[in-house]
Structures are given as structure tokens and as C-alpha cells.
Amino acid sequence: MRDIITSVIVTALGIFAFMSATPLAKSSAGLSDNPALFPQAISFVLVVLGLILLAKSVKNQRMVELRFRKISLLKVSSLFLILIAYLVAMSHLGYIISTILFLYLMMVFLGCRKAKACVFSFLITMSLYMVFSLLFQVPLPEVML
Amino acid sequence: MDLGLYTSGLAHVLDFEVISLIFLGTLLGVLTGCLPGLTATMGVSILVPITYTMSPAAGILMLVGIYLGGVYGGAISATLVNIPGTPSAVMTALDAYPMAQKGKAGLALGIATVSSVLGGLFSVFVLILVAPVIADFALEFTSYEMFTIALFGLGIIAAIAPGSIIKSLMAGAIGLLISTVGADPITAAPRFTFNNMLLYGGVQFIAAMVGLYGVTEVILNAEKYFNRTGGAKNETTSLNPKKILPKLVDLKKIQANIARSSVIGVIIGAIPGAGGTIASIVAYGTQKKLSNHPDEMGKGSIEGIAAAESSNNACTGGAMITLLSLGIPGDAITAILIGAFMIHGLQPGPLLFENNLDLVSAIFLGMVIANVFLLFIGLRGARYFAKLLNVPQAILNSTIIAFCFIGSYAIQNSFFDIKTMLAFSILGYLMVKADMPRSPIVLALILGPIMESNLRRALSLHQDNLFAFGYGFVNHPIAGTLLILTIVTFVLPMLQKSKWARKESS
């Protein structure tokens, strides 16, 4: 099952890339100055590989189950959501506030005790801020409300 | 004889700041290498950002220190908790952990340290001798050779990556496709940029690596935690390493072994696509065949540790040969190093020896220094690193993510690079779920532009005549041989497989 999904996605990706590279070819004359040559060759290989894998996994019929468990799938997706939220928060709340909040949330989510998470999220944020902002002079995002 | 290659880097290296940075890099490398869940590849990729503001020599030397330290560091957790801190320490764990269980953790770590350093130093020695010769030779390379070397490297990594060859090839092809995002190398036409100006310069390589190896790894660690059923914890401190300095008697027993394994390591390291893990497996296997006590191996024999550790550290010098003289990465870590070179405005390859000889020389000297630091850190510090294994995973993993974010942002102070990082972390996670190796993508991102521009240059030389282009391989014997080797690498396993399949069915 897993391999069938993989092969379908890869084949679709190959077809998509091939199609989106096609308009690039119009403007040029020969093979070597054709911007679409390399991407299309690769997409073609991708489609072939996808079809081989599809044929193999359909023929095998060994049902390799997806290695997701329901609970962990939910938790992993929320983990990715926390990461995206951190990115959004950073551009609005500035580096320090968003990082303290993110680290606290993440540590608690990964099973750290709340008091410990409070202390460490503050300490780590401050050390990162000092290293990057003061030592390396990276202009970190500031509060923009 | 021109000694410039060996002395012109002294000015860079004999500087207190640079020496401290090499030390710091080696230390950080050992740290990331020894913590399970933080591989050497991840260490190098998430620590590249702290070198942005340094001078190229200081930054690159620090990264080389991280690289060497990371490869060694895997041995510490392999010994103490039976988890290879980095994939290439997988063979070390076979013997080092049983020794630790017998109360000889100190001896195991001592042997691992001395073997690593000897292997590493030997490989630097070979690097210094061989790299200039190859670079000189490579100056004559045409687009044919460069194209086939890149193809060969990608082919090898796909062939030896764990799991199915088809999936590894898919990973490589996806990587090549991603490498075409941005301006076309010849006509500068925008490709796959989806009208986003920020993609015109291509996908930001370091951000992609931080996502693929940093964030993905943390997500996988977290998933392990979510799936954990019992309250199983690593038991570490009971195996407190004492008496780390190995005795001369023990060292004498393994000197031939170390020498042989180091040679194996350098050679395998220099093959584009192969790396430390393969080298240690081959060296371990060879040692088992030649050993006087083959049945002791795997049960806590110093021979096994010496073979595995000297070979995987000897790989570093070997991989640097191909990196510096050809600009071709040997494995995922060296691919990231090439990305770091580019960030500092340097293009590894034969021209590096002509234009930046002082830097090449500084790298040679820096590697020697890093290996000496490694000896010191390993023999004096191993017991402290043992304590690090007790740092709570929640805090460690959260910190790594925060580091990944700030590191990606700092590349060019842009949120777009963080988005790139997140996209690649999702890609990395899905790939792991689909059992697809990530290393071919990393190599493909570096090799893609080399392959494409050289292929098209070769085609235009023959006025786009495909037949003439194909015939060109006859006139370029190196390219032709490598092309045949690449094809054989793929056809052979498939033929063997179908033979097995026939045997099984009959």
C-alpha cells in the first residue's frame, strides 16, 4: 500500500514537472540551449521509476502497511503546525517573545515538566539571542504589530 | 619542490582565533556526534549558520573540525548506550558496547579514540599527497568527465543507500529536479519559480539541508517519543568510563589492523557516493577474515573497535580529496560542506588549488590540528560527554528546532529561507515514511547544476548532434569508463536479484 502511494505521487510529480517545463522550450532552438531539456529528461526518468515501482508493488501484493499510527500522526501534524505557528509568530511578535513561547510549548508537548520548560525556554532564547544578535550581528526580527 | 601547498596556510592557521575556532568546532562536533538523534550530518548542517560572519578560512576550518568531531563522536554513545550517535559508528557499537557491559568502557573509548585519530591523521597525510595531483589532473577534464563523475557519484550513492535502488534513484531524481529551480545556467530563463522572485536564485541549499536533516530528525525523535509504550529510558551512568588511556600492549596488537583499516577508509572515502558507514563495514569484515580470534569479534573485541573507528575516520581525508580536487561531494556531509564553501564565496574543484592555495593549505593543516584536538578531547573528555547523554530529549530537541529556525533565517535575514526549511522538513519526513533515503537528494542538489551545465556544454560542442555526443565518450576514456561503471552498478544488482527470484520460484 505504502509503495503504491509513493509510486503514484512520484509519477504525478514527474508528469507535473514535465508539463510545467514544456512552455520553457518554445523560446529556444537547439538541444543545448533549451532550458527544458534537463528538467524534462529528469521528469521522464521520474515517471519511469514511478511506473516501475507501481508495477512491482502491485505485483507483489505484499501489503506493507503504512507506518503511521493514528495518535502519533495527529501529534506529528500538530508538531508541524506548531512550527508553522512559530514562523508566523516570529514575523509579528519579534524574535524573543515568539521563541520563548515556542520553546515552552514545544518542551511541554514533548513531555517536559512545566516549571522546567519555563526556565529553560527563557535561558535558551536569551543565549541564542546573545550569540546571534550580539556576537554575530544578525538583525533578528523585531516586534511588528 | 614547491612547499607553498604546505606552508602558505600557516598564516591562516597560526592565529589564536582560528585555533580556538577549530577547537570549538571539534568539541561541538563530538557533542553532536555523541548525542543519539544528532548525527554528524545534522551537526554540520545546523552549525553552518554560526560561521556566516567569520572569514572563509576560519569558517571552513571550524566546519572541518565539526565534521571530524562528529564522525568520531558517534563512538561515544555507541560504547555507552549501544546507540551509534552517527550512522558510521554502527560497527563500533558491535564490540564497544559488549566491552562496556563488561566494565571496560574506558578501554573501549580509549581504543576508539586512538584508532580514530590515527585513521584521521593517516587520511590527512594521503589527502595532502594525492589531492594536488588529482587537482592538477582534473584541470584537463572536459565537460564529458565532469558530467560522468557527477553521474557516477549520484549513481553510487543511490546504489548503496539502504533499501530499494528504485527508491534511491527516485530520491536522486527528485533532488536533480529541485536543483533545476531558478535561473537556467545557460540562458538565464526562470524555471519552476512560480513567479516568485525569491526562487530565481534557486533553492537555498543550507536551509534545505537544515530542514532535511535538522528538523526532520527532531520530528522523528518526537514521533519515537509519542509511540513509546513503556517508560524505557537510556541507562547510561552505570557504565562510567574510567582509565581511558589505552596501554601500549593493546595498541601493539592492533597496529596492523589500524593501518589496513585506514587504507580501506581513505579509498572508500574518496569514491564519490560511498562514505564512512560503508568503510567501517568493509574494514570490519576484512578484519574478521584476517583476525586470529574472529569469534571474539562482536562480543567485545578491541580489534572490531579499532577496525571500525580507524576506517570511518580515515574516510574524512578520502572524502576531502574528491571534495577539494574535483568539487564532487563524497557523501551527505561533504555535500553540505560544499554548500558552506559556496556561502563563503568559494567553489571547490581544481581551480581552488590555483586561486586559493592558501586556503587549501590551511584546510590540510587545520585537519591535522583538529585530529590532535580530537585525541585530547577523546582521552580527557569522554567521561563528561557520558553525562551529556542524560540531557532530557524534550529540551534538546526543542533547542535544535530553535537553532534551525535562527540558522536558516540568518543566511540572508529572510523568512523565505525558514519556509524553505519547513518545506524540506516535511519532504524529509514523508521520505522517511516512504522508506526513501535522503542522502541522494543532498548529493543531487550539489551535483545537479554540475551535471546539467556540463551535459549541455558537451552537447553544444557537437552542434546538438546526439550521435556525435555519444561517440564523444569514446574519445574521452575516463568519462567512458565511468559511464560503463555507472551502468554496471545498476544492472548487476538487478541481474542478481532476478537470479535469486528465479531460484526462489523454482
Image (cartoon, coloured by chain):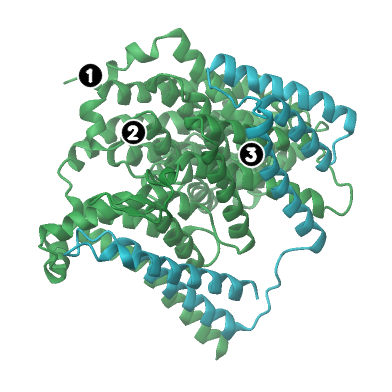
Chain colours: A cyan, B green
- Select label 1 or label 2 by which is in front: 1
Viewer-side residue, B329 vs B340: B340
Marks 2 and 3 share the same chain: yes
From the top left corner, tell me how far across and down residue B393 is, in percent.
77, 37
Viewer-side residue, B170 vs B402: B402
Chain letter, disc 1 residue: B
From the top left corner, tell me how far across and down residue B24 is, in percent.
55, 19
Mark 1 lies on a secondary structure that is helix
Q: Are the residues tagged 2 and 3 within 8 Å (C-beta)?
A: no
Q: Are the residues tagged 1 and 2 within 8 Å (C-beta)?
A: no
Q: Give the spatial CA distance, label 1 vs label 2.
A: 15 Å
Quarter placement of the C terminus of chain B = bottom right
Sequence-wise, which precedes: disc 3 or disc 1? 1
Residue at x 39%, y 14% (from the top left corner): B13
Instruction: Single out the residue that lies furthest toward the top.
Output: B16
Give the class, few, some or many, for how many residues have Cα within 10 Å of label 1's Cα (few <14, many ≥20): few
Q: With A108 as the anchor, is A64 left or right in this view?
A: left
Which image quadrant for residue B103? Answer: top right
Chain letter, disc 3 residue: B
The residue under label 2 is B127
Chain letter, disc 2 residue: B
* Amino acid residing under circle 2: Leu
* Amino acid residing under circle 1: Gly
- Select label 2 or label 3 by which is in front: 3
* Amino acid residing under circle 3: Leu
Decide: is B372 above or below B317: above
Sequence-wise, which precedes: disc 2 or disc 3? 3
The residue under label 3 is B38
The residue under label 1 is B4
Q: Give the spatial CA distance, label 2 vs label 3.
A: 27 Å
